[in-house]
Amino acid sequence: MSKQAKTNAMRALERARIPYAAHEYPHHEGEAVDGATVAVLTGQDPARVFKTLVTQGADRNFYVFVIPVLGELDLKKAARAAGVKSVSMLHVADLLKTTGYVRGGCSPLGMKKAFPTLFDQSCLDQPTILVSAGRIGAQIEAAPADLVRACGGGTADLLAGGQG
């Protein structure tokens, strides 16, 4: 990784003494890159590259779900796993003020506030997974169990169509 400033996500892993590898990929400044493209640009199997989705529950609280980039979040499964009646995707316009991150650079680690976080259970099938490092153009790779622990999260079947 070039001499870029550490992100909050990287600092969170270091505070937790969790080993990680940083990866960078080319992008246009301020322009989000979809997860499938990130997998190609970082030379990774898309099953190992995860995206971070932020939702708001019927209880008005926020919930974070981390799923494979080619997967689709099943909102009913997500709500059930979070223990709420329903969840809906957070509007992109609200992402920065809620999490401190922009679309395409949202990490499950180092958000402004810690929200309940669940990873799709398929992450446990991989030796390591990649998630956003907290800015567009950067990913962090670590063992899934370490990432789940660092987020204070858990795992659940979250994918639509039985993908997980």
Image (cartoon, rainbow, N blue to C red):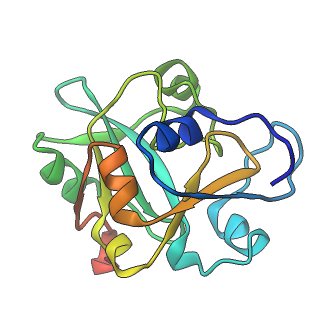
**Whether residue 98 is situated above or below residue 161 in the rendered picture:** above
Spot occupied by residue 32 in the image (x, y as percentages of width and height): 73, 46
Q: Residue most toward the front?
A: 17
Q: Which residue is drawn at 37% across and 71% down?
A: 123
Q: In this orientation, which residue lies closer to the viewer: 130 or 81?
A: 130
Percent across and percent down for residue 25 are: 80, 59
The residue positioned 51% from the left and 57% from the top of the image is 19
Q: Which is nearer the eye, 82 or 58?
A: 82
Side of 160 where 35 appears, left or right: right
Q: Residue at x 50, y 78 (%)?
A: 47
Left or right, 41 with reference to 95: right
Residue placed most toward the observer, 16 or 163: 16
Residue nearer the viewer, 131 or 55? 131
- Quarter holding the N terminus? bottom right
Residue 89 horizontal/vertical position (percent): 40, 41
Residue furthest to the top: 97
Within the image, what quadrant is residue 147 found in?
A: bottom left
- 85 left or right of 112? left
**Numbered-mark total:** 0
Q: Residue at x 31, y 76 (%)?
A: 164
> Where is residue 131 drawn, in percent x and y?
54, 56
